[in-house]
Structures are given as C-alpha cells and as structure tokens.
Image (cartoon, helix red, strand yellow):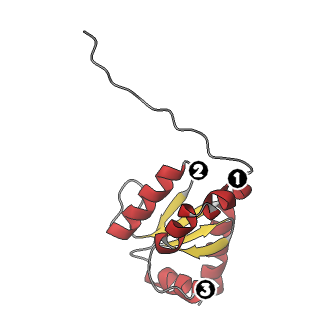
Amino acid sequence: MSQDLQTEIGREVDENKILVYGKGTKDAPRCGFTLETIEFFNRLGYPYEVIDVLENVPKREALSQMTEWPTLPKVFIGGTFYGDTDVLGPMAENGELQQLLAKTFGGPAREKPTISIRKSV
C-alpha cells in the first residue's frame, strides 16, 4: 500500500466524524449495501460523509488491508473502523451506537423536522 493512499485515507477519516467508504455517493448509491448504510445513517440524524471507492481499486485494496475487512461499505466513527451495518445494526439495537455517537459528537442528534402535508377543506 502506498504511503500517499494511507495518508489520504487517514486525512479523510480525521476530517469526518462518520465516514462511509462505499460504492457510489449519498445521492447516487451504486449497490444495495451502500444504500442500506446511507438509509441507516439518515435515520440516526448525525452528519456523515460517503466516499465512492468503487472505481478506485488501489484505494479499495488499501482500505481492505488497513481494516482487514474485505467488503464495502466500510464505516469509520470517530476515527475508528466499525465494519458495516451488520456490526452497527446490533450496536444500535442495544443502545451502544447511540452512546458512541453522542460521545463522538458531544451530544444527541438534532431532531429532524417533520413535514406534514394536509389537505385543507
């Protein structure tokens, strides 16, 4: 793995409290697992970033070597690698993930406004 790739990945992880390396972007996921991860984090209410590594084979290989996790997506929270939603889902169910995110962000997620569309009579 090149030092440049390792430095680039380290910088990206440091710059984002939640970072997802996946196939596609938030607006245009290119695989079901990346879409599932985007939907998962959308429900949690914290800001996160998705970096598309589908076409960047050297970066994908570097990430696999660094994490010892062969598949995408790869999720980092607070600079630590956590796997994907197979790992994060059970953490969310038992409350561990919410505690981790509150600690990482310094508090609970902001409530998302709800929009109600009602027909007036």
What residue does disc 3 label? Answer: 66
Query: Is disc 2 in contact with disc 3, using a CB cutoff of under 8 Å?
Result: no
Residue 40 in sight: yes
Q: What residue do we see at 70% from left, 53% from top? A: 105
Q: Which class describes the residues within 10 Å of circle 2: few (<14), some (14-19), or many (20+)? A: some
**Which residue corresponds to the image point at 52% horizontal and 38% vertical from the top-left?**
112
Chain-order first, disc 3 or disc 1 = 3
Seen from the viewer's position, the closer of residues 18 and 97 is: 97
The secondary element bearing badge 2 is classed as loop
Say left or right for 67 vs 60: right
Q: Which residue is mark 2?
A: 46
Q: Amino acid at mark 3?
A: Met
Position of residue 1 relative to residue 25, above or below, is below
Question: Which residue reaches farthest top?
Answer: 121
**Residue 9, percent from left and from top:** 61, 74
* Rendered view: 7 above or below 64: above
Q: Earlier in the sequence, mark 2 or mark 1?
A: 2
